[in-house]
């Protein structure tokens, strides 16, 4: 950059100096002619008109010297009127004494006919600023020369009539910061425009040498600026180029700012730090770039990219970014600190690449992007993203793909009023998201091929990522709501204060008054976990479920029984597992501190208790499972001939009930306890009356009424004063009748003793026993005799 800053000034100085020293030579000669004091050499060539030794000329304004010209010898020739000057030295101080530029050479010629002054040999130029010149006595050299620029050229032609100057030759320059050349120079005095014709080439010194080239350059005076056509900067394997770039200078000849336009393109290469690290390659494209520098012109102060800005980075974590406008701010040391991407800003992080992969094949995982009207980035160390904050409507899109095939597995879109993302450096190199916070009005929409859309909303959302850039968890807080699964009528919904989603197991964990609803079901618990892939839900701790809105089962004449009422069905348990299709929920254990480890399901006065209850809401079926010490239990009623209802309690290891069939099947150590009997068996089927009974045009609901009980396998029946055994027992409450068969059946009481037959019929409220027997199985009656 120091080189570019000074090209315009040393070339302009050449033109000014030649016009001054030619005018000075003419005035000096005229003065000596008038005074008759011009010395004549001892030997004069026939073409030599006059000569002078020790020529010096100065020009001053307001008491300060502007320039001084010295020549060792001046020769004027008669034949063609040429004036030759040798050993010329010129010092330019400037009107404000801020310069100490020197131009010197051995051989110059002046043609009075054309007005051209031509350098016959090499011209040396030293350019040096003298900021304290005005504070020192006139013509005082700088105490210390700093950042001097040395130039060398030949064939320079200056016309004193037009003030124009040019050379087709090569101009070489050198300074502490750079060296290089250009081919051909043109200076037009009327417009104060200097043109570097072609082949501009500059090499910047330093550990990472940079090379600046351009096809053509133009320097103008007001304002001081340099226009480079097709500039290209190369440094350490990286390039920056544009169709045109204009550099604007301040009063100290330092670059104040730069504007590049049309087809701006940058290729930035960063080799891997080890064989296990993928090299990083970045490209930047824009239609316009504006850079502002500090007062010294050697450090960036701010930057602006505009017009279809695009950035792409390859390597371990590929990244793409785009916006219509990108603003950059730098620290005092010229280190990039902040970047503001505006107007449709977008940053896309591609699938991670396995470290050391020669083919740069992506691995399976997530690629994601952030889009917003504006995104503000904080940059750490001038090179690594540290934080990003969005403004205006914003969203984060996560695309889950399977490795190199890039086959879309799922898509998740997260929106919020504002996002704040934090970045970190990946272990093998590159940048990855560490966390994202969004609020207010957070919304997450998940889409999986061939599955219904899943939506969750909350006041805020936080996303966490692994060191390799993979999403690990999403936390939503404040009025969390979730819906997903089947169609609108059957889909599962959830509500809570807080939800945490983990990608490893696809679970959403709800805490803070969680509530889950299905087609007709509502469940509350201390904690609810839902699987976003399968739609399953697991509720834990003080679980309470309510099923509402079911009509009486239509498949069964007269409607259902145990669950046939229009009243809600309630369930309490320690845990619940639910599936969205079919609509099945499994309840286990008791709610906190209650039920002695049993789940409880009831509708009005109908109740089922068991360590585990599986309820199918769609088919209205129940499977209750118990243990020998904690069996499944059901409370029903029986109605006698007189219409009197009394309770019946049934227990067993397993209960299977279908409301369509109105049959409750008990298995494994079944016991039925009535008001005046107890029956046990291996299996028992209980047939229930329809749940809705009509009496005097009114619907009567209540406990399910037993129509018939059929017990089988090792049947024992006990009543007050008698005991019966057999293999099958049929009990009809409305007739108060027991029919016992198989075994053969037998009855024993204190008065009659033991009675055995093929079939024994007896009643609840009297002592009658009807005995049936066959020829090969005579009836046996044993009577006890009192002594």
Image (cartoon, rainbow, N blue to C red):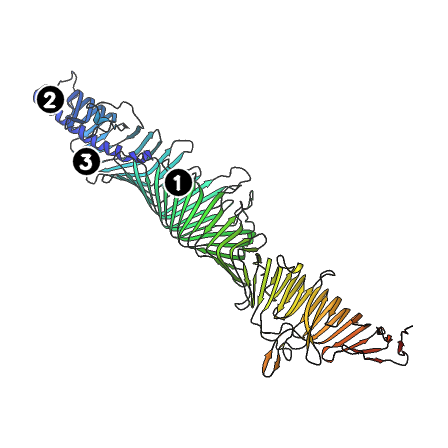
Q: Of label 2 and label 1, which has the lower sequence position?
A: 2
**Label 1: how many residues lie within 10 Å, few (<14), some (14-19) or many (20+)?**
many
Q: Which of these two is toward me, 600 or 359?
A: 600
Q: Kindly tell me whether residue 551 is visible in this rendering.
A: yes
Q: Is residue 714 left or right of residue 413?
A: right
Q: Kindly tell me whether residue 449 is visible in this rendering.
A: no
Q: Which of these two is toward me, 86 or 182?
A: 182
Q: Nearer the viewer, mark 2 or mark 1?
A: 1
On-image quarter of the C terminus: bottom right
> Horizontal and vertical percent for residue 679?
77, 70
Give the labeled residue for mark 2.
Answer: 32
Give the labeled residue for mark 3.
Answer: 163
Instruction: Name the residue rendered at 29%, 34% in the picture.
Output: 6
Marks 2 and 1, how far apart in space?
A: 64 Å
Q: Of label 3 and label 1, which has the lower sequence position?
A: 3
Q: Of label 3 and label 2, which has the lower sequence position?
A: 2
Q: Is residue 88 left or right of residue 485?
A: left
> Horizontal and vertical percent for residue 424?
49, 43
Instruction: Name the residue rendered at 75%, 74% in the picture.
Output: 710
The extreme top residue here reads 42
Give the labeled residue for mark 1.
Answer: 336
Q: Which type of secondary structure does the marked residue at label 3 adopt? A: loop
């Amino acid at each position: 950059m120091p080189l570019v800053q000074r090209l315009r000034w040393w070339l302009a100085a050449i033109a000014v100096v030649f016009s001054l020293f030619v005018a000075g030579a003419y005035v000096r000669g005229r003065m000596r002619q008038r005074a008759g004091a011009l010395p004549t050499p001892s030997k004069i060539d026939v073409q030599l008109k006059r000569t002078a030794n020790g020529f010096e000329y100065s020009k001053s304004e307001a008491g300060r010297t502007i320039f001084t010209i010295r020549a060792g010898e001046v020769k004027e020739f008669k034949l063609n009127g040429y004036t030759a000057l040798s050993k010329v030295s010129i010092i330019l101080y400037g009107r404000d004494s801020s310069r100490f530029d020197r131009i010197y050479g051995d051989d110059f010629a002046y043609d009075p006919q054309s007005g051209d002054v031509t350098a016959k040999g090499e011209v040396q130029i030293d350019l040096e600023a003298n900021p304290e010149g005005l504070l020192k006595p006139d013509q005082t050299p700088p105490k210390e020369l700093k950042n001097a620029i040395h130039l060398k050229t030949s064939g320079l032609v200056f016309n004193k009539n037009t003030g124009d100057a040019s050379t087709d030759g090569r101009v070489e320059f050198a300074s502490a910061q750079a060296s290089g050349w250009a081919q051909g120079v043109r200076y037009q005095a009327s417009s104060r425009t200097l043109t570097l014709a072609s082949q501009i080439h500059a090499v910047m010194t330093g550990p990472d040498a940079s090379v600046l080239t351009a096809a053509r350059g133009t320097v103008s005076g007001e304002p001081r600026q340099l226009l480079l056509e097709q500039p290209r900067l190369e440094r350490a394997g990286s390039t920056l180029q544009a169709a045109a770039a204009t550099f604007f200078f301040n009063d100290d000849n330092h670059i104040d700012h730069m504007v590049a336009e049309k087809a701006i393109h940058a290729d930035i290469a960063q080799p891997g730090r080890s064989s296990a690290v993928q090299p990083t390659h970045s490209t930047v494209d824009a239609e316009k770039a504006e850079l502002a520098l500090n007062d010294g012109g050697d450090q960036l102060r701010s930057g602006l990219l505009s017009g279809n800005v695009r950035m792409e980075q390859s390597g371990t974590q590929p990244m793409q970014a785009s916006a219509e406008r990108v603003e950059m701010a730098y620290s005092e040391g010229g280190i990039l600190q902040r970047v503001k991407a505006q107007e449709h800003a977008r940053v896309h992080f591609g699938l991670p690449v396995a470290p050391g992969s020669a083919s740069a094949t992506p691995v399976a995982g997530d690629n994601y992007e952030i889009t917003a009207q504006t995104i503000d980035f904080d940059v750490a160390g001038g090179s690594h993203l540290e934080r990003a904050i969005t403004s205006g409507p914003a969203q984060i899109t996560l695309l889950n793909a399977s490795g190199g095939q890039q086959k879309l597995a799922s898509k998740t879109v997260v929106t919020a009023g504002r996002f704040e993302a934090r970045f970190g450096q990946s272990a093998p190199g590159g940048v990855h998201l560490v966390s994202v916070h969004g609020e207010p009005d957070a919304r997450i929409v998940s889409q999986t091929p061939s599955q219904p859309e899943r939506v969750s909303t909350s006041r805020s959302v936080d996303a966490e990522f692994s060191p390799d850039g993979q999403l690990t968890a999403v936390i939503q807080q404040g009025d969390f709501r979730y819906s997903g699964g089947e169609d609108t009528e059957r889909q599962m919904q959830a509500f809570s204060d807080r939800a945490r989603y983990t990608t490893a197991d696809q679970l959403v964990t709800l805490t803070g008054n969680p509530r889950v609803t299905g087609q007709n079901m509502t469940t509350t618990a201390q904690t609810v976990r839902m699987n976003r892939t399968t739609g399953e839900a697991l509720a834990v701790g003080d679980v309470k479920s309510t099923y509402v809105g079911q009509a009486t089962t239509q498949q069964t004449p007269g409607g259902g029984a145990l669950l046939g009422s229009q009243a809600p069905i309630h369930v309490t348990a320690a845990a619940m597992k639910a599936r969205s299709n079919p609509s099945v929920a499994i309840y286990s254990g008791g709610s906190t501190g209650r039920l002695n480890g049993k789940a409880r399901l009831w509708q009005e006065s109908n109740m089922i208790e068991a360590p585990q209850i599986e309820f199918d809401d769609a088919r209205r079926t129940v499977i209750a499972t118990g243990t020998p010490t904690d069996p499944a239990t059901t409370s029903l009623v029986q109605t006698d001939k007189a219409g009197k209802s009394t309770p019946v309690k049934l227990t067993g290891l397993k209960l299977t009930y279908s409301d369509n069939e109105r049959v409750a099947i008990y298995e494994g150590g079944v016991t039925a306890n009535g008001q005046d009997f107890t029956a046990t068996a291996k299996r028992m089927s209980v047939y229930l009356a329809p749940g809705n009974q009509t009496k005097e045009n009114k619907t009567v609901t209540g406990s399910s009424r037993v129509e018939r009980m059929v017990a089988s396998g090792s049947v024992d029946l006990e009543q007050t004063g008698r005991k019966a055994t057999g293999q099958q027992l049929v009990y009809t409450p409305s007739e108060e009748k027991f029919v016992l068969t198989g075994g053969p059946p037998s009855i024993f009481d204190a008065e009659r003793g033991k009675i055995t037959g093929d079939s024994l019929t007896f009643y609840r409220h009297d002592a009658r026993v009807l005995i049936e027997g066959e020829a090969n199985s005579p009836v046996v009656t044993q009577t006890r005799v009192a002594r």
